[in-house]
Amino acid sequence: MRMQFCRASLAVAGLLSAFTLFQATPAAGAQSPQAATQAVPTTVGWALDGAAFSETPVAIQAAAAGIKAEPLMGVTVLFEQERYTLLADGRTVQTHQLLFRIEDKTGVEGWNQTSVEWDPWYQSQPVIKARVIGVDGRVAELDVHTLTDVPAKNESEDTFSDGRIYKGPLPAVAIGSIVEEETTVTDKSAFFAGGGIYRSYFSRGVPVVRSRLVVEVPEGVPFKTKAHLLPETAVAKIEFAGTNKLYSYDLSPVPTLANSDIGLATTRPQSVFVEFATGESWASVAAAYRKLSDGQIQPEQVKGLVPGRKGIRWRRLRR
């Protein structure tokens, strides 16, 4: 129940994409100057796209009443926002805001908890806030004491990680209730000194009325961004907050992601997404990774290659 998000060291994953992104112009991706001045279409007198928990339950219910549920959809996402605050030392603060309405029993069963993934080695434990607005207007607040922290499972049995999932049950979730939540993950150290590549996906398998991506970039931090399959109705604009630049993409309505059991690999994007990078250049990223890895390599301890059950493996000398 979260916007898809992928973050990787530029020297470890997403290399081809990162390379092409470094060649892009440091502006708003594929958007034209005309697109930056277009107004975002809204279907209601909008009270749903402000700061989390800034609107009263009555105002939220009144605005949501103008949005009809689509058939066979368990949830309607009324508003979603991903905000990245990039810091000069390479750290990032990621804040995810989500507002959705439960439409049927499948929505209750599939969206009755909140969760966020994090990595303790470079991130602080996330902060989660949430409230559930019942059909009768009563509000149930998330009790932080119900949140638990568990290891994140990895799909590969040969991959080990210290990744964690911070999660808990949402209170009083029922058909017709509206859930508002906000999660914040703060880096306590930079993921990779040479820069990072980030991807934020707008589409979901359920209807999304409005979605927004905001990236705050301090002065002097390298930054390039590129949009993929972004409709002309989206707004890509640049604003200033002091010496920081705010890059924002605002999309309404959002194309629904088509679910498929086939899952064939493809080189073409299947949903709307925006990617951005903070590396100075491809050469600088490679140099930073070499500086990081060279000290960990001990060639004198490597004797040679030996066959193993899962292919060729390195044999190390014992001391």
Image (tube, grey):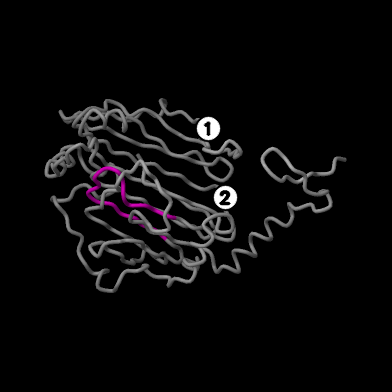
Q: Which residue is mark 2?
A: 189
Tell me the kind of residue under disc 1: Pro
**Which residue is at a point 54% across and 55% down the rendered structure image?**
13
**Residue positioned 58% across, 61% down in the render:** 194
Classify residue 243 by image quadrant. bottom left
Q: Is residue 31 left or right of residue 149?
A: left
Q: Position of residue 62 (x, y in %)?
A: 13, 41
What residue range appears in magenta? 199-216
Q: Quadrant of the N terminus?
A: top left
Q: Which comes before the other along the chain, label 1 or label 2?
A: 1
Q: Is residue 40 above or below residue 62?
A: below
What is the spatial separation of the Cα atoms under label 1 and label 2, in whole angstroms?
21 Å
Q: Nearer the viewer, mark 1 or mark 2?
A: 1
The answer to whether 233 is drawn above or below residue 95 in the figure is below
Residue underneath mark 1 = 151
Measuring from the top left, give residue 57's x and y in whole percent. Answer: 19, 37
C-beta proximity under 8 Å, tags 1 and 2: no
- Residue at image position (40%, 36%) is 115
What quarter of the picture does the C terminus occupy?
top right
Q: Could you classify mark 1 by the number of other residues whose Cα lies within 10 Å: few (under 14), some (14-19), or many (20 or more)?
A: some
